[in-house]
Amino acid sequence: MAALQQVDPEIATIITAECRRQHHKIRLIPSENYVSEAVLEATGSVLTNKYSEGYVGARYYEGQQHIDQVETLCIERARSLFGAEHVNVQPYSGSPANQAVYLALAKPGDTVIGMSLAHGGHLTHGATVSVSGLHYNAVQYGVDPDSEYLDYDAIDDLVQQHRPKLLFCGATAYPRQIDFERFADIGHRAGAVVVADIAHISGLVAAQQHPSPMPYVDVVTTTTHKSLRGPRGGMIMCRGTEFAEALDKAVFPGLQGGPHNHTTAAIAVALKEAATPEFKQYAKRICDNSKSLAAALVEHEFRLVTGGSDNHLILIDASSKDITGHQFAKALDASGIVCNRNLIPNDKGSAMRPSGVRIGTPAVTSRGFGTDEMIKLAAWMERVAAARGDLDLTLDERRQVYREIATEVRAVCDRFPAPGLPQ
């Protein structure tokens, strides 16, 4: 970063520090990952200089010969990878992609149904603090209070009762596979447009480690980072073309101006990588690591929501260790292990002081971690929880435990260089 260091040494210093942090700490936030050096190069390319309002062959600015090639390649790769007939790669991220669905296929005041944020859904699935909950009549479903699995019979009853315009399926904190075929049947019998948000699991879907919604639902939205291992962006995909024009118009000019062409190029690179046999093995290892880590955590007497995981994500009830999710997340970060606090179903805490933490295995799997590292990780997490919950320890004694674990974590991280980071 010679040029950046010369022009803006303050920003260069911050970026260098962040690079060190990403190397030295174990990143367990399930929505984070490491992109390849090729994706980074495309993201930082001269394509950021070009404005391109409109779509391929129908732009409002001249000089689009190369931009149209990039966007066409990106669309073709997404269609092939996910089996979609129509793809829009211009959404700036997953939330704008979902908002485009609302704009295209519903009107303010229409009834929409999605998974409750408190039970593992996303803000854009009808949460009251989101536009999706403020401008629409949002009805929410959750998980069974005992099993913590999705209760499809209860969801069916709710959907048939309210007959929504849109039915969202997909989650941001649900550790089990989702039955998209069942959701499609439920929604279509009620006359709803069924939308699958696969932002978290798109890499698993692409690699056939999670059933695809594409044969069943009407619209699929996703981010392009997380398990797909691309840049921060979004896509909207359809199995048919019935809603294609409305969705495209909702993205532009409805919600956005020109696409971020450097991001589009980086998405195209990530999609090419995701079509390789190596990526399929990577996605399988994500799930294998998640199962191994969940099993090891259970051995250390952590309570997990649903008792385990069959995707990339694990939701831990920190109250099983007599601490809050907020306390656990802060203590883990001090120990070199990064996660996020998270509500669990029927949480007695608040969003800022929840009972749970959310962890996932995409980033650590990108580094090459395997079963042995998952066992070590669970042991470290147990030590952190024990220190944080021990009221007989002084603050300095707790911090000493955290420092000792952070040193051990760093030694393991040094053995597993992260993709895309300077070595």
Image (spheres, rainbow, N blue to C red):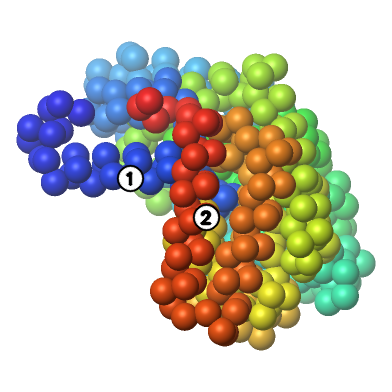
Residue 153 location (% of width, % of height): 92, 67
Residue 287 location (% of width, % of height): 74, 40
Between 407 and 365, the one lying in front of the other is: 407
Residue found 66% across the figure and 47% down from its top = 376
For the residues marked 2 and 1, what is the alpha-carbon distance in whole angstroms? 20 Å
Residue 405 — which label? 2
* 134 sits left or right of 115 in the view: left
- Of badges 2 and 1, nearer the viewer stands 2
Residue found 44% across the figure and 78% down from its top = 395
Would you identify the image quadrant in which residue 239 lies?
A: top right
Of helix, strand and loop, which one carries label 1?
A: helix
The disc labelled 2 sits on which kind of residue?
Answer: Ile
**Label 1 belongs to which residue?**
18
Residue at the left extreme, as displayed: 7
Number of numbered callouts drawn: 2
Category of crowding for the residue at label 2, using alpha-carbon neighbours closer than 10 angstroms: few (below 14), some (14–19), many (at least 20)? many
Would you identify the image quadrant in which residue 354 lies?
A: bottom right
Residue found 66% across the figure and 85% down from its top = 348
Residue 411 — which label? none
* 238 sits left or right of 328 in the view: right
Q: Indicate which disc, 2 or 1, sits on the residue closer to the N terminus.
A: 1
Of helix, strand and loop, which one carries label 2?
A: helix
Q: Can see residue 112?
A: no
Q: Is residue 365 above or below residue 336?
A: above
Check the picture and name the quadrant holding the N terminus.
top left
The disc labelled 1 sits on which kind of residue?
Answer: Glu
Residue found 47% across the figure and 43% down from its top = 410
Category of crowding for the residue at label 1, using alpha-carbon neighbours closer than 10 angstroms: few (below 14), some (14–19), many (at least 20)? few
Residue 123 location (% of width, % of height): 55, 65
Q: Is residue 119 above or below residue 103?
A: below
